[in-house]
Image: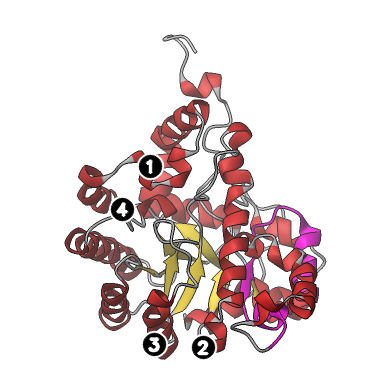
Amino acid sequence: MTDAESPAEWWPELAPAITPTAATKPPFRVVDVHTHLSVPAAGAIAAPFFRPELEPRTLYSSPETLRYNREYRASDRQTGQFEDAEVRLSDMDRQGVDTQVLSVPPTEYFYWLDEEHALRACRVQHERFAEVVARYPDRFAAVANVPMNHPELAVEVMREARRDFGFTGFELSADVVGLDLDHPRFDVVWEAAAELGMVAIMHPQGFTHGQRMTDYYLVNVMCMPLASTLATTRMILGGVWERHPGLKMIVVHGGGYLPFYFARTDHAFTVRPELRKHISRPPSDYLRELYFDTNVFEPGMVRHLVSEFGADHVLLGTDYPFDMGTTDPLGFLARAGLGEDEARQVLGGNAERLLRL
């Protein structure tokens, strides 16, 4: 790219625009459970402590991807979508979405911060979310970010988010600075979440062993669902839901690959003792207790999730405002062939019930 050329001229697809939905807006509340709101003030707290090796998506991104992401996020449209509630409202109206559930972008988990700065960053994020929700209570809800690398502090922050801000869920990555979520140190988090009725929303931040994924944007294309697949499988086989049956979890990006290939894991459970150490039932029994969003890009995959796991376990999610999101969710789901009751549950009813909106 020459100095005379702008990023938009070189990459015209920067920050895809939201156009009016091709579908008819239903007469009930439409809720998007998978959206991200950036909080630059929290980023400023974390910035002095950042190192690229702490973030897999940065560590395993090619120079082309890193450059594109910088210019993508710096575009006027994208900055507004990530930070400005009013810009989001305009896009939501075009999409036919009544309510967005706000969560931090995965790049803003900041799990690598020490306790003092992690607490400060989370509180700044929650205060910003609460400000937006208070200004537009019918249009936005929010879930917490908790410092998972400090489990006892994470429980404290979770309780504070529930008590002081009214949040009914929390977002988390598919690993915590490389540590898998089936590790016993996180049991206090799962116990508190079940006790408080805080729904966990798993959204990975890359994949910790992405050495072979740097080209072709595989660091996102493959690694995001792969990270969710690995994390969910380990949590199931590690007995997390055996120990904490009250824990409710939504796994975005359609749950990763596991909901579409769980039979292999079930088969291994029947023939291999390694899979039976911590669980008493086939792995898919626990999988059926989880929830999945619709950000899968192929209507038939939504149909599979509904048919296999029930319409009451599938929720509308777009990944707004990332370019790997669904820009016309109503139009997309109209092609999935859902029945009227199924559509009512997927488009909003399940979110209202789970997150007590």
Point out residue 176 in the picture as x, y percentages from the top left corner. 41, 61
User: 59 or 36, which is in the foreground?
Assistant: 59
What distance separates the C-alpha of mark 1 from that of mark 2? 33 Å
What distance separates the C-alpha of mark 2 from that of mark 3? 16 Å
Kind of residue sitting beneath label 1: Glu
Q: Which residue is mark 1?
A: 53
294 magenta-colored: yes
Q: Nearer the viewer, mark 2 or mark 3?
A: 2
What distance separates the C-alpha of mark 2 from that of mark 4? 35 Å
User: 261 or 325, which is in the foreground?
Assistant: 261
The answer to whether residue 229 shows anywhere in this view is yes
Q: Which residue is mark 4?
A: 39
What distance separates the C-alpha of mark 1 from that of mark 3? 34 Å
Q: Secondary structure at mark 2?
A: helix
Kind of residue sitting beneath label 3: Leu
Q: Tell me the tag on residue 243.
A: 2
Contact between marks 3 and 4 (CB within 8 A): the answer is no
Q: In the drawing, does residue 47 fall left or right of residue 146?
A: left
**Mark 4: few/some/many CA within 10 Å (<14, 14-19, 20+):** many
30 magenta-colored: no
Counting residues from the start of the chain, the first of labels 2 and 3 encountered is 3
Counting residues from the start of the chain, the first of labels 1 and 3 encountered is 1
For residue 187, above or below residue 172? below
What distance separates the C-alpha of mark 1 from that of mark 4? 22 Å
Q: Which residue is mark 3?
A: 196
Q: Secondary structure at mark 1?
A: helix
